[in-house]
Image (cartoon, rainbow, N blue to C red):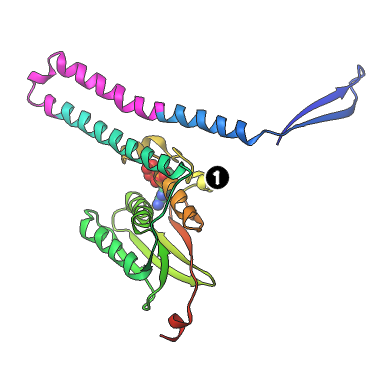
């Protein structure tokens, strides 16, 4: 709903009335506005690496290619920018698949504790930072019906952020909590945190708290938007809690029915 207010003022200057006109913005208009903003964002995000590449390639063509010190450096920049564009286009393809109406999940019953544990193992093997991992996982199996590939992507996006924003020597904690009819999966870090006023926006497409900084870290601003869509199609919710300078915790829920078998085992 959009409201326009007009103040009725007499020549004396006294206000003696107020007219409020309420417009119902149709869903169609809203979708159209969002679509336009999305296209503008995509164009901007692609133009930045392309213009960077153009100037480096021009410099190389103008003679920098002959310089053994400069040339490899300039080529490296163009390679990094190409990588960024590939990541961006891959993320966009994922989002457009999620947006299409005939979207299908291929769900299977999975023990989420093992599944999460294996993903954490992969990150622990690959990490090249001084960050320690702490797992607070139940010792019994928890079976949920998920699309493993999609859920891997959700966890991948959340965990890579936790690592990206972690300080040297920081700790990343992984947990699963059981509640009535749902499980809550959380990843928390001891990183820079997110200002309160921005926390609601981090799941929006292309939203980044600090554009310059996250661009340097190679972010596209789409990781959490993809995670959100993927959690929603599983019937869950996703949210974040954070304190600036202390750290961030990103959590999501998944529907879960505790069966009698689980209770007795
Ligand atoms: P990006 O690709 O830029 O990381 P995301 O959609 O994954 O995009 O995240 C959106 C923004 O949310 C990030 O740019 C960053 O500003 C903020 N953010 C996400 N996770 C964290 C975290 N663990 N700590 C601090 N900031 C975070």
Q: Looking at the image, which is closer to me, 172 or 105?
A: 105
Q: Looking at the image, which is closer to me, 158 or 110?
A: 110
Tell me what residue is drawn at x 32 percent, y 49 percent.
164
**131 left or right of 34?**
left
The furthest residue to the bottom: 264
Q: Residue 246: x percent and y percent?
A: 43, 56
The furthest residue to the front: 102
Q: Looking at the image, which is closer to me, 124 or 114?
A: 114
The answer to whether 31 is drawn above or below residue 264 in the figure is above
Tell me what residue is drawn at x 71 percent, y 34 percent.
24
The answer to whether 209 is drawn above or below residue 183 in the figure is above
Where are the magenta residues, as a range? Answer: 43-72
Whether the magenta-drawn stretch holds residue 95 is answered as no
The answer to whether 114 is drawn above or below residue 80 in the figure is below
Tell me what residue is drawn at x 28 percent, y 36 percent.
86
Whether the magenta-drawn stretch holds residue 49 is answered as yes
Q: Which residue is mark 1?
A: 197
Mark 1: give few (<14), some (14-19) or many (20+) Cα within 10 Å: few
Q: Main secondary structure of the magenta part?
A: helix
Q: Residue 1: x percent and y percent?
A: 70, 36
Q: Residue 61: x percent and y percent?
A: 15, 15
Q: Residue 249: x percent and y percent?
A: 44, 58
């Amino acid at each position: 709903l959009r409201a326009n207010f007009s103040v009725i003022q007499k020549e004396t200057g006294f206000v003696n009335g107020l007219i409020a006109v309420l417009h119902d913005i149709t869903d169609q208009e809203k979708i159209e506005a969002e679509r336009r903003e999305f296209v503008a964002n995509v164009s901007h995000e692609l133009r930045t690496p392309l213009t960077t590449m153009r100037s480096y390639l021009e410099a190389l063509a103008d003679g920098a290619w002959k310089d053994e010190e400069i040339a490899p450096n300039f080529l490296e920049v163009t390679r990094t920018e190409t990588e960024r564009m590939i990541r961006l286009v891959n993320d966009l393809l994922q989002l457009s698949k999620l947006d299409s109406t005939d979207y299908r999940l291929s769900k299977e019953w999975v023990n989420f504790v093992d599944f999460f544990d294996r993903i954490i193992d992969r990150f622990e093997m690959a990490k090249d930072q001084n960050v320690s991992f702490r797992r607070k996982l139940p010792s019994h199996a928890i079976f949920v019906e998920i699309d493993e590939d999609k859920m891997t992507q959700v966890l991948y996006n959340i965990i890579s952020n936790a690592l990206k924003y972690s300080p040297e020597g920081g700790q990343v904690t992984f947990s699963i909590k059981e509640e009535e009819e749902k499980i809550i999966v959380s990843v928390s870090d001891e990183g820079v945190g997110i200002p309160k006023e921005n926390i609601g926006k981090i799941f929006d497409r292309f939203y980044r708290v600090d554009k310059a900084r996250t661009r340097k870290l190679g972010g596209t601003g789409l990781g959490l938007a993809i995670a959100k869509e993927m959690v929603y199609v599983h019937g869950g919710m996703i949210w974040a809690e954070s304190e600036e300078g202390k750290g961030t915790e990103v959590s999501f829920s998944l529907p879960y029915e505790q069966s009698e078998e689980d209770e007795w085992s």
